[in-house]
Image (cartoon, helix red, strand yellow):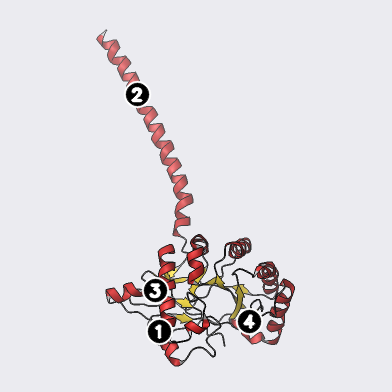
């Protein structure tokens, strides 16, 4: 009787162990399958960072460049606040930079992001602090989609911004902090509202360099802000004419557009602009500190 009981218990134990082994094999196999899918995605870099010593990435880098620290944090830690007086530039062959100012905006920016996603293109968005505060989720989507983000002041008020370099820097840093609290990194590129011509003195240039920012201008525009490109058709034609007149800009074509409220025609024009540039052999890059001066 005891022998039969031992035999029965042994059979039960064998079944249990076999089942456990099969379960572990299935779990291990399933984990390997999941790992083979997830891990490569996690390793795909979407951005690069300046080093603690504020070293810039190589000039041919085509990923958005950010800083893990805000300017205030760098000051508090005693870390360098700038890359220095010199930086390397990337000149390509038929390279286009699509840039959008004054956003984000719920309707227009979201539609632009949808278009860029369909076209597999990354662009650059220069954000104002006021709109960052209004649409933090759109800021987050821009960042998570792999586009580059730059600072475009807080208020976009020319009279205020160009009253002194300190006022300009205060607005830049205020917007920087807002962006940092949303995405956990801060930009190192900026664009002066209205451009630097007629606005920046040497003191302004020195002020932004002292905190590691690179101002990014433009050398082509659709005219969606000055009234010359009020319709999508006219915006495309404006850009076509500029490309024909200045073929030498194909090494770094930096196109100014806007995505704030009131720029619905820019959204309509964007697919045609992209198609035209592709037809002419252009590739698309995000703006980085190594993007050459516009002119």
Q: Residues within 10 Å of mark 3 (few under 14, many from 20)?
A: some
Give whichever of discs 4 and 1 has the lower sequence position: 1
How far apart are the two marked residues, 4 and 3, measured between alpha carbons? 29 Å
How far apart are the two marked residues, 2 and 4, measured between alpha carbons? 76 Å
Q: Residue at x 54, y 67 (%)?
A: 104
Read off the residue under disc 3: 50
Q: Which element is circle 2 on? A: helix
Which one is nearer the viewer's eye here, 229 or 112? 229
Read off the residue under disc 1: 166
Q: Which element is circle 1 on? A: helix
Give whichever of discs 2 and 4 has the lower sequence position: 2
Q: Is residue 207 visible?
A: yes
* Quadrant that contains the C terminus: bottom right
Q: Is residue 31 left or right of residue 102?
A: left
Query: Horizontal and vertical percent for residue 112?
Result: 61, 65
Residue 73 found in image quarter: bottom left
Q: Which element is circle 3 on? A: loop
Query: Horizontal and vertical percent for residue 36?
Result: 46, 50
Read off the residue under disc 4: 220
């Amino acid at each position: 009787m005891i022998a039969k009981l031992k035999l029965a218990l042994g059979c039960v134990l064998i079944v249990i162990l076999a089942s456990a082994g099969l379960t572990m094999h299935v779990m291990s196999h399933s984990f390997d399958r999941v790992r083979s899918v997830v891990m490569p995605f996690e390793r795909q870099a979407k951005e690069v960072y300046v080093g603690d010593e504020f070293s810039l990435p190589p000039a041919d880098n085509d990923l958005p460049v950010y800083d893990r620290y805000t300017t205030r944090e760098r000051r508090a830690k005693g870390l360098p606040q700038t890359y220095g007086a010199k930086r390397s530039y990337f000149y390509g062959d038929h390279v286009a930079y699509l840039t959008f100012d004054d956003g984000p905006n719920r309707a227009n920016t979201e539609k632009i992001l949808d278009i860029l996603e369909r076209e597999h293109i990354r662009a650059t968005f220069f954000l104002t602090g006021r709109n960052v505060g209004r649409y933090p989720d759109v800021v987050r989507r821009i960042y998570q989609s792999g586009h580059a983000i730059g600072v475009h002041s807080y208020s976009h008020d020319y009279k205020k911004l160009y009253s002194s370099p300190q006022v300009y820097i205060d607005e830049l840093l205020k917007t920087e902090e807002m962006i940092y609290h949303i995405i956990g990194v801060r930009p190192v590129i900026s664009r002066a509202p209205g451009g630097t011509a007629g606005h920046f003195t040497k003191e302004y240039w020195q002020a932004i360099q002292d905190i590691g920012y690179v101002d990014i201008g433009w050398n082509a525009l659709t005219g969606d802000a000055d009234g010359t490109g009020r319709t999508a058709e006219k915006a495309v034609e404006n850009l076509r004419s500029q490309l024909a007149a200045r073929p030498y800009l194909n090494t770094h074509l930096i196109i100014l557009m806007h995505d704030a409220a009131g720029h619905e025609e820019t959204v309509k024009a964007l697919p045609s602009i992209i198609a035209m540039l592709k037809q002419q052999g252009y590739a698309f890059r995000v703006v980085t500190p190594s993007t050459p001066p516009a002119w």
